[in-house]
Structures are given as structure tokens and as C-alpha cells.
Image (cartoon, coloured by chain):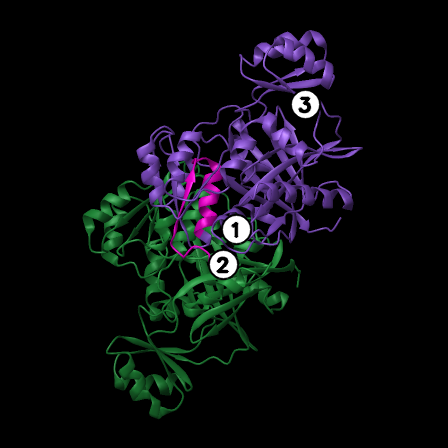
Chain colours: A green, B purple
Amino acid sequence: MNDPLPQGSVIGILGGGQLGRMLSVAAGRLGYRTHVYDPAPAPPAGDLAHTVTTAGWDDAPALAEFAAGCAVVSYEFENVPEAALDAVEAEAPVHPSRRALAVSQDRLVEKAFLRDLGLATADFAAVDDAPDLAEAIAEVGLPAILKTRRLGYDGKGQARIDRPEDAEAALAAMQGAPAILERRVDFSHEVSVIAARGLTGETVAYDPGENVHRDGILRTTTVPARLSAAQRTDAALLAGRILERLRYVGVLGVELFVTPEGLLVNEFAPRVHNSGHWTQAGCAVDQFEQHIRAIAGWPLGDGSRHSDVVMENLIGDDVDRVPELARQPDAALHLYGKGEARPGRKMGHVNRVTGPARRP
Amino acid sequence: MNDPLPQGSVIGILGGGQLGRMLSVAAGRLGYRTHVYDPAPAPPAGDLAHTVTTAGWDDAPALAEFAAGCAVVSYEFENVPEAALDAVEAEAPVHPSRRALAVSQDRLVEKAFLRDLGLATADFAAVDDAPDLAEAIAEVGLPAILKTRRLGYDGKGQARIDRPEDAEAALAAMQGAPAILERRVDFSHEVSVIAARGLTGETVAYDPGENVHRDGILRTTTVPARLSAAQRTDAALLAGRILERLRYVGVLGVELFVTPEGLLVNEFAPRVHNSGHWTQAGCAVDQFEQHIRAIAGWPLGDGSRHSDVVMENLIGDDVDRVPELARQPDAALHLYGKGEARPGRKMGHVNRVTGPARRP
């Protein structure tokens, strides 16, 4: 077994958004320093990091210099370019692994990976052009959703195909990018499971949270989710299978559809996940600390929850509600220090403890 | 009423220890940046601050430059030199006020202030030399404790006088510093109340915690404390009187002795307080955020608690227990990133949620 990183070690984080910011705070709580790398000046994570490097993803010397000072490097978003990883990996270990990143960067590869693992997903087919799409519709059926294989998030790069005549416009919306057609799943609600695997192979999962989206963006997560005991077990087991197969180190977020036939995996993210922010208020070890524990060689928190929580995102103009939220006794506010409240931009979140943990 | 400081404003913190570190994290949560000023290089708070200035308390130009970039300045310890405050106050508002600092810097002034407020304290008398001490012993009685008037903390600068023949050695231990003799109080236990007053005059108190000291250093705080309903009310009211009289802005920690005759005030600290660390695990708004809210013109959290908590300090070699603590599911660890574990040095703390909040 590896010893944990010594106190005072530097943990590198690729990407300086709110996830990097909260990872930096968690790293500090365990006695580590963080070095944040981001192409944009004054990234949110920089306010709470020991060191910030502002340089591009194509700046190999800057990436190498950054990584050379880090005991381990992680990332807060899954679209880190390959070449940037090459430069970093030459100087420091990167967790979660390249394979986790590669699988999750491409929806088609991800779905195939999940199917190979024996996990249920929506039916899907690859779509590169109009003939592909016609064939995919015949195979997968309608209604369906056409999605770009890469770089989609928060509902971007997606088009619904309810009837055959929607196909042409949907394909045009892909702007020539390789795509995947997914059958629309008839689900009652969506849950996600936040799980982690440590350097020693230990795996742990938090109890699933129930997610509500609006306009393709997560609005709230409520814990506990409406699930049967068997579904809860399923959720933890399937997350464990993904972690094991990828020999993953760190926190993983898995989105699941709850259907009459059981849980379907929608997608996973190789990082801390918005739907895990509730752990800040409900657990001794939150998802951010869990991730730092995993990549720094600590024993993992056991995922137990002392309180039930509702997490609400503050998106765009929602930030105008802060004065009102500040007066609500049960609202634990987390603002991300972002300057401009653009529509759809995640500006912060609120956790509310709703009571001691119920055991559903 | 003042508007809150705009998002992205810089909050200055004099002193870069663990209290400054946790204030910096709380400021970040509310969308602010911090600038930490400390004479020592690489202070613990620097790992989690936007900016750090390393310069002495006598470096007026550095202090002025620091303050000029801050919307408001606070401090994490009560022994900020007068001249340093002069330099800062010329450039930015300082909270809590100079008067709070002046009163709490001198045990004699503090006790006189409390007595003038009508609050119960141990009997006390000023001691500058041997004749004073003899007179003070006659007036106050024995057993008693001789303490330097200034710069004492964690039991330093104190000497017990149980019998008259202890007097000479006790006086010698003061090394010529002006002192105060305090009658030793026969108390059953010690509690502290963490209270706050906002820019608009609003005052709030958390439920008192029960403190256990060893070797003059706080070891644990348990919430709720063993107190009657009347004592709880007393604690909040007396903290409120101190806050009002000082027209205080920020968080205040008040240590109280519980005696058969009621609560006696031991001392207060014009800052966030070690005995308030439990609020991180038990409240939506912890003491660090409460302090930032107060000095930044926000409404205060109402002090309500969702969970009961035991806080344990990790002092000196206690930090060797971290590997074991890391395996305890209920232990929320906070390490301060300090290099060397000297005896008596506060290296971190652990919060444990012990259950939903009991209403005693």
C-alpha cells in the first residue's frame, strides 16, 4: 500500500472553475496545497488556490512546468485535450486515468463501454451522415435524441427527433460533428450515484441523489432519492463495476434513469459532479475531499450521511436571489466568485439540511 | 442600511494562521477574495487566499498598500499592534473596532469593562509590584491566578497562587510585566458563547458549547453544553450586552464559568474562536461565514443548529493520529497545513456530528 502524500504536497488541478475551487478547499482541509492551471485569467478556483498558472492547453512548456511541481495532477472537466495530458503525464501521475477520460469524452465509446460491462443503457447507434441517421432511426426507433459524440454538456449539442421529419434539422444541428442517436428513455425520474475508488482499490458510494433538470441543466438534487432498496444496491454495484473496469482513482459521477425495468445508465463523468454537492452539508467527508483522499492515497470516507439535504443550483439570474437566500436560516450558500451572470451559467448553489438522515 | 460589499471585493485579514485560513474559505463561499497579511512567510492562510503579503507589523508602507486594496480589513488575533492599526485604518475600515481590540488586549481593562457592564466576573485587582500583590491577595483572596495583563493566550503568562508563599515565584514569572490577580473561581464547567453583531446592529448567538481544557489549551467543545434554559438565555444576553456596548461588528467569543451562583465571564476574544469550530459541522452558517457576513454587511445567519457536534483539537503530536482519524467514518478533519508539530501547537481539529440537534 502507498503512503498518503506528505502534508504540504502540491496537488495540480487542470481547470479552474467551481469544481476546481471546491477541490482546492478540500485539499486545504487535508493539509495540501493546490496549483490550478487554466487558460482564462483569474479563474474562480484561483481565489482559493496556492498557485495559479494562466496558459493555454497547447502550451506544452507551461504544462510541463506546472506538472513538474505537483505530486499528483487531477482535472475538473472531462474535455482536457490529449496533447495537454501528454505534457502533464511526462512529469506527474494523473488521476483519474487517461482511459477514464478517453471513454467519457466520446458518448459512443462510453455507451459501448457500458454495454460491454453488461450495464443497461438506452439503445443507441453511431451517426456520421444522413444515410447513417436513417439507418439508426430504423434500428433504435423514435422518439430519440441525436447528440454530438464529443464536447456536449448541460444539454448543448443535442437535438430531439420525435418524428422522421425532424431528422434533417437534427442532423444540421450537429454541424457535421460525429454523432450518436439515443432512443429516448421513458423514465420516471433521474438519479445519480457519486462513487469513488482509492489508490488501493477500495470503492465507496454515496447514497444516490434524485435530480431535477430544467433546460438541460441540473436544478436540484434531493437526498435520499426515491428508490427501492434493490435499486439502491444496483446503483452502488454498477458504479463499482465502472470504477473497477477502468482501474479508476478518484470520484466518479454516474447519471441513471429510473424506469419500470430498472436503472439505465445515462452517462458518467470522470470527476466530482454537480449532483454530489449535497455531500458538503450531509456527510463528514464530502465528494471533494473524497476525490482528494483518493488521488492522495488516503483511506476513503465511507459515504455515510448524517443529514438529508436538498441542493439547489443558482443559474444565471438566480444569483439575484442571493439577498433573499441570505435571510433563510437553513440555506448554506456557495457562491463561485464568477463576475458575470450569463444565462445558463452556474453561479453558485445552496444546500439545505432537511432533517436527520432517513434510512429509506 | 448599507448594501453588502459587491461580489469579488477584497477582504483583508491581519494574521495568517488557521483562523485566517478558515475565514478565507468562508469569504470565498460568499464570493469574496481575501488578502492575508502576516510577518511570517508561507502562513497557513496563504494556501487558501487570493493574495498574501509577507511584511512586518512595523512596516507602515506595506500595511498601507495592503489596506488600500481592501474593501474592509479584519484580524484573526487580538494582539495587532496599535501602530499597525493606524496604518491600516488610514486606508480601509477595520472590523471589529479598535475599541474592541483595545479592551480585549488588556485583561485589567477587559475585567473593568465587564464589571462596568454589570456582568459577573471573578474578583480581580491590578498588580504591578510586590506590595500591590500583597494588597491584591488581601482583597481578592486565595486561591488566585496571577496573569500578565497583555499577550497571554493558551495558559501562557499565568501562575497559580494557592498559598501566600506562592506569591513571590508567581510575581517573578510575570518577568516585570503589569499583571492582574484573579480569584480562582470554583466552577463546575466552562462554556463559551459565540455571538455576532452585523453592520446594521443585528445581534445573534449560537447555542453555547461546553469546553474542556488541558494544560491551559482547549481540547474539546461539545454542543449542546450542560446548561439550564435560564443559563442559555443569560449567555446570549450577556454576549449581546458586550456587542452593543462596543458597537461591535463581527464575531465575538465569550468564555464563561458555570458556578452555583450563575455564569461568570472569564474573558472574551474579538474574533472567531476555537470553541466555535463546531459550527462548521452543525450549522448552515458557520462562525467564519458569520464573521464575513457581519463585516461585509450581509444579514447574519440566525445561529440555528441542525446537528449536535463534538469538536476535538489536534495539538502537537495529536497530528500523528490523522491516519487513524482518517478511517473513522464520522470524523470531519480540518488540518491547518502547518509544517512542524511543536508541543502545544494547534495542528488541526476534528468535528463529529453526534446526532440531530437536541433541544435541551
Same chain under badges 1 and 3? The reply is yes
Q: Check the residue under mark 2 and report the chain it is in.
A: A
Decide if residue B329 is in sight here: no
Identified by mark 3, the residue type is Phe
Foreground residue among A111 and A279 = A279
Same chain under badges 2 and 1? The reply is no
Neighbor class of circle 2 (other Cα within 10 Å; few <14, some 14-19, many 20+) is many
Q: Within the image, what quadrant is residue A152 found in?
A: bottom left
Q: What are the residue bounds of the magenta stretch?
A: B1-28
- Lower sequence index among marks 1 and 3: 3
Neighbor class of circle 3 (other Cα within 10 Å; few <14, some 14-19, many 20+) is many
Tags 3 and 2 touching, CB below 8 Å: no
Foreground residue among B221 and A323 = A323
Neighbor class of circle 1 (other Cα within 10 Å; few <14, some 14-19, many 20+) is many
| Residue bearing mark 2 | A277
Identified by mark 2, the residue type is His
| Residue bearing mark 3 | B124
Instruction: State the residue at coordinates (56%, 48%).
Output: B286
**Residue B186, percent across and down?**
75, 26
**Residue B12, percent across and down?**
40, 43
For marks 3 and 2, give the CA distance: 51 Å
For marks 2 and 1, give the CA distance: 31 Å
Q: Is residue A203 above or below residue B173?
A: below
- Quadrant for the N terminus of chain A, please: top left
